[in-house]
């Protein structure tokens, strides 16, 4: 076997791939070949490191050096300087924004400091396409332990004791779900992995599947043993081609080693896994809709009860768990439920992966212990708001969640606390908004999303969300009234109260929570016909301040509507009737002479 | 690869694959042994690459975890090349001179594995008293 | 099967396991308005889509209102069918349906025979608060027997249940999603090109005038329809 002295780990997640990391891999390999060190250095493509803001990421082992924003053309320098001469390429190291110091280790970077990685433990550490690496990282040991040393009831007890709760959003205790599915007698049962991640901006499930597919397969087999199922489905969005291909490879490798298939570890336990592709309907993340879709039917939810644990796929008892939930399972068995329970809070043990997005400096994937505050996530890990703007709100739980304002930033994150302030954990999307975001516009964006994603089965969701969107459109166009605000609340309350599934039951949350926390902004829209953030085009205008305008003509030249007039060195004027409010003049003016408002 | 029949077989695969990951999992560890091979022009000219390969090979043969081998530039002892420095916790940093293939293997077995210094090959006990 | 005690509007009754709230309420002579619900006892088929959300009731200890037609009773369940919260929700749901429904009741085929119309009257709906876009579909007059007017469809899914589960012909299913959802034969084919056998059972269960039969006296000479031989 080969004895590499050095491993170059390059992120092969979707984010870094999009910024050319695979080309970087190619260049590295070429350079290694050129310098005849192919026997010494190995290039490994891994899953997501989470620090997508600074991708592509390249990590050098054993030196433990973490390079960021590495371009394909940097490959040669990394090989000749670092790999051959042992000198770090300083310019590719992370620069600590406060001290301006270059940091070389991954753990020393503030983005990683407060993170605890359980679900993402192998992402960015192993090669997801090599089962041996997963096995070396203690892979399939938990399955071996469950099958050979524990009874199904003991397996379930362990999960119950750990206190693990569903990471897909609902927060239902995983152990109890397994227990109920086990209790329902049937000749056939099914394990389903919900990989239909649909929240705008969320990508934790994708990253786990891309970076550590075996951990999900192993956990599904454990769950199958626990509830008495021999078959599992992974319901995954067809829009995740990389995750799908990694899963296919992983399933093939696991089958080859007999870790999936018949008579696993000679215990008589059989378990197989098949993939089912979703066509990108958000509602199919709802478990009953997902089950119908797996069966090849229209992806529509149905009334519960019967719950999937009673009647799921093909009318057989089924257990639906989310990707991240599964990824937590193997470590719970290897390190014990007590270890898991010690992390996080009493009611919500463990960690949660969040997809940090929006107006935050370090966009990416973070795994933090429950109980951490939003402030720590956004300001310490996320590095604060972009361009030193003022923090306005953070939306958790995606289109089902609500906005959280600065007054609640110090609340420890767990399922209950987020619900108590009108939002929810959801699957872990976290979208940060700054002073330039209009909250009415944000609410409109989310309702537009849920309106599009409504399956159309029940009346309140189908027609109600459409009516809400219409009212919000009316408001953002300057035709809203105060009665409209009351109507939004009335509609929102009834849609939540009467909708058939979780989609409709939560879809008004972004509207209701912004109405609650940002009433002034709504009132400004309907009373003063003014959008304070300057987002709703009908409700703001650009004006040239005569005292600041020097008559440089830059604005007049860039205006695509040719609606700015004025002679050289004289004050310019915008013809409001023709202005299309594109903001080109505003961005061009070097003298801050154009005011938006 | 054949199908696994027992947990023991899984453990075997794990053991075999561990080498591969050791390089990474021990990167953050405090008590790993660091082997630096001087690989500047002088070192390479004197066969440092062969030495390094031998060291890597011997580490794998002995099944040693927690050892990382890195290249370094000219230490300044060109007359003694190839030069290899071994840093391990609880022991002073040791600099060996004229390390050929055999001496490289010896360093791995005696110094790293058995904790005995190769007195005859040491050029200086440590960098501190070199200066 | 065991008996289960349930309290509805302060009256307690013991019913068989598996009974829905709606059925239990019926035994107590408590009327809960329904729309999509349809129980074809003689063929043992229930339209269980629970999609209209008109029959919602309040259950103690539950966060949301529950559809009484699809919620089985459980021991000790306490239900209220006539609270302000239920009535307001019910009314708003019907208002929403009406906001996406043609208002040509006077000249509608189902005038005085329309379940949506009687429900609106029962709930005393005298104005429609929300106005907005209305779904419009081309009327399907291709067949000699059944006219499909999806503008009047309230997506109760009764026709689907009847066609697929009772008659097992499988003509109808939902097409598109959200506000654009409508019921159509496969590939949205016109009725005369579909596999429909024109048994007419879907028409008989349709609560509105979304599915009606061709009336020769009225529609005769109507080009394609011709005469019914």
Image (cartoon, coloured by chain):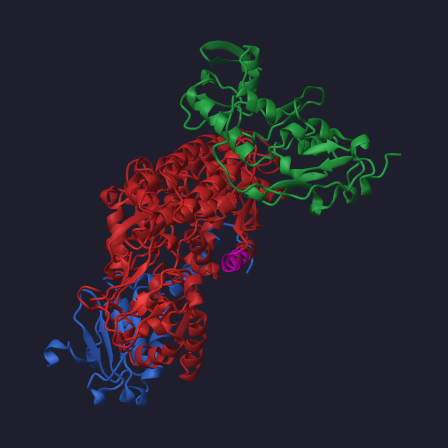
Chain colours: A red, B blue, C green
Q: Position of residue C156 (x, y in %)?
A: 61, 31
A592 sits to left or right of C160: left
Say how many tags the image has: 0
Q: Is residue A216 visible to the viewer in this orientation of the structure?
A: yes
Q: Is residue C74 above or below residue A205?
A: above
Q: Position of residue A94 (x, y in %)?
A: 27, 68
Provide the residue span drawn in magenta: A239-250
Q: Is residue A241 above or below residue A511?
A: below
**Residue at horizontal 38%, vertical 40%?**
A481
Q: Is residue A427 visible to the viewer in this orientation of the structure?
A: no
Q: Is residue A547 above or below residue A191?
A: below
**Residue at horizontal 73%, vertical 36%?**
C147
Q: Main secondary structure of the magenta part?
A: helix
* Quarter residue C158 falls in: top right
Q: Is residue C201 above or below residue A374?
A: above
Magenta-colored stretch includes residue C136: no
> Which quarter of the rendered picture does the C terminus of chain C lie within?
top right
A449 sits to left or right of A586: right
Q: Position of residue A432 (x, y in %)?
A: 32, 52
For the residue pair A160 and B36, the one nearer the viewer reads as A160
Q: Position of residue A236 (x, y in %)?
A: 52, 50
For the residue pair A570 and C45, the one nearer the viewer reads as A570
For the residue pair A131 and A554, the one nearer the viewer reads as A554
């Amino acid at each position: 076997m080969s004895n590499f002295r050095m491993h170059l780990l390059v992120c092969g997640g979707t984010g870094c791939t999009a910024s050319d990391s695979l080309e970087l891999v190619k260049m590295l390999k070429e350079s290694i070949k050129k310098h005849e060190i192919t026997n010494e250095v190995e290039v490994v493509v891994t899953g997501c490191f989470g620090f997508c803001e600074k991708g592509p990421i390249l990590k050098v082992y054993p030196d433990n050096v973490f390079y960021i924003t590495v371009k394909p053309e940097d490959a040669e320098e990394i090989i000749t300087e670092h790999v051959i001469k042992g000198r770090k390429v300083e310019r590719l190291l992370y620069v600590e924004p406060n001290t301006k110091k270059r940091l070389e280790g991954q753990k020393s970077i503030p983005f990683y400091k407060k993170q605890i990685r359980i679900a993402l433990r192998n992402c960015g550490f192993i090669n997801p396409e090599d089962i041996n690496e997963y096995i070396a990282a203690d892979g399939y040991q938990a399955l071996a332990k469950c099958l050979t040393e524990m009874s199904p009831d003991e397996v379930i007890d362990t999960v119950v004791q750990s206190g693990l709760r569903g990471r897909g959003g609902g927060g239902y205790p995983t152990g109890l779900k397994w227990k109920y599915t086990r209790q329902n007698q049937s000749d056939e049962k099914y394990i389903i992995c919900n990989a239909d991640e649909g929240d705008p901006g969320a990508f934790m499930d994708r990253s786990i599947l891309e970076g550590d597919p075996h951990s999900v397969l192993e956990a599904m087999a454990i769950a199958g043993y626990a509830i008495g199922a021999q078959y599992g489905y992974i319901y995954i969005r067809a829009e995740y081609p990389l995750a799908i291909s990694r899963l296919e490879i992983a399933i093939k490798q696991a089958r080859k080693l007999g870790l999936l298939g018949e008579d696993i570890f000679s215990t008589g336990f059989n378990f197989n896994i098949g993939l089912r592709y979703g066509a990108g309907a958000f509602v199919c993340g709802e478990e009953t809709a997902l089950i119908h879709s797996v069966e090849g039917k229209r992806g529509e939810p149905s009334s519960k009860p019967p719950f999937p644990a009673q009647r799921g796929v093909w009318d057989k008892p089924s257990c639906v768990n989310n990707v991240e939930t599964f990824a937590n399972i193997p470590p719970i068995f290897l390190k014990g439920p007590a270890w898991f329970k010690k992390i996080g809070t009493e009611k919500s043990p463990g960690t949660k992966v969040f997809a940090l997005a929006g107006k935050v400096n370090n966009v990416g994937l973070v795994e933090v212990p429950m109980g951490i505050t939003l402030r720590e996530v956004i300001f310490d890990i996320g590095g604060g708001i972009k361009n030193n703007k003022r923090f306005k709100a953070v939306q958790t739980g995606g289109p089902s969640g609500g906005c959280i304002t600065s007054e609640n930033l110090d609340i420890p994150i767990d399922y209950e606390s987020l619900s108590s302030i009108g939002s929810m954990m959801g699957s872990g999307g976290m979208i940060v908004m700054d002073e330039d975001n209009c909250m009415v516009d944000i609410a409109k964006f989310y309702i537009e999303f849920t309106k599009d994603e409504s399956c159309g089965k029940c009346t309140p969701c189908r027609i109600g969300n459409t009516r809400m969107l219409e009212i919000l459109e009316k408001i953002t166009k300057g035709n809203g009234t105060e009665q409209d605000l009351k109507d939004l609340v009335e509609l929102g309350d009834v849609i939540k109260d009467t909708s058939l599934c979780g989609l409709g039951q939560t879809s008004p949350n972004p509207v209701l929570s912004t109405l609650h926390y940002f009433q002034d902004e709504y009132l400004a829209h309907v009373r003063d016909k003014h959008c304070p953030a300057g987002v709703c085009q009908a409700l703001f205008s650009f004006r040239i301040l005569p005292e600041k305008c020097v008559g440089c003509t830059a604005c007049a030249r860039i205006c695509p509507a040719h609606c700015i007039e004025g002679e050289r060195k004289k004050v310019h004027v915008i013809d409001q009737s023709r202005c299309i409010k594109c903001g080109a003049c505003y961005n061009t003016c070097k003298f801050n002479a154009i005011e938006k408002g | 690869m054949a199908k696994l029949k027992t947990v023991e077989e899984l453990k075997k695969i794990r053991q075999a694959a561990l080498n591969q990951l050791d390089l990474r999992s021990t990167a953050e560890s405090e008590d790993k042994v660091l082997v630096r091979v001087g690989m500047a022009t002088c070192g390479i000219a004197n066969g440092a690459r062969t030495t390094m390969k031998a060291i890597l090979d011997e580490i794998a043969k002995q099944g040693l975890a927690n050892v990382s081998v890195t290249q370094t530039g000219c230490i300044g002892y060109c007359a003694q090349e190839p030069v290899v420095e071994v840093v391990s916790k609880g022991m002073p940093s040791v600099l060996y001179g004229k390390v050929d293939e055999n001496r490289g293997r010896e360093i791995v077995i005696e110094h790293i594995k058995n904790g005995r210094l190769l007195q005859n090959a040491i050029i200086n006990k440590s960098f501190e008293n070199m200066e | 099967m065991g008996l289960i005690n349930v309290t509805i509007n302060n009256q307690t009754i013991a019913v068989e396991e598996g009974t829905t709230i709606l059925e239990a309420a019926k035994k107590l002579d408590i009327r809960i308005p329904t729309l999509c619900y349809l129980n074809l006892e003689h063929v043992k088929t229930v339209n269980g889509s629970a999609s209209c959300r008109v029959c919602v009731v309040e259950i103690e200890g539950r966060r949301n209102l529950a559809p009484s037609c699809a919620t089985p009773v459980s021991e000790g369940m306490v239900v209220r069918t006539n609270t302000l919260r239920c009535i307001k929700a019910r009314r708003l749901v019907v208002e929403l349906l009406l906001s996406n429904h043609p208002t040509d009741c006077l000249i509608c085929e189902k005038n005085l025979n329309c379940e949506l119309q009687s429900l609106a009257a029962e709930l005393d709906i005298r104005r429609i608060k929300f106005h907005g876009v209305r779904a419009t579909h081309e009327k399907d007059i291709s067949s000699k027997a059944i006219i499909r007017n999806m503008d009047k469809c309230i997506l109760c899914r009764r026709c689907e249940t009847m066609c697929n589960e009772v008659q097992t012909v499988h003509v109808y299913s939902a097409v598109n999603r959200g506000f654009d959802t409508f019921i159509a034969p496969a590939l949205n084919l016109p009725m005369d090109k579909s596999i429909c056998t024109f048994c007419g059972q879907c028409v008989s269960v349709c609560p509105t005038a979304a599915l009606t039969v061709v009336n020769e006296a009225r529609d005769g000479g109507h080009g394609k329809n011709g005469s019914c031989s």
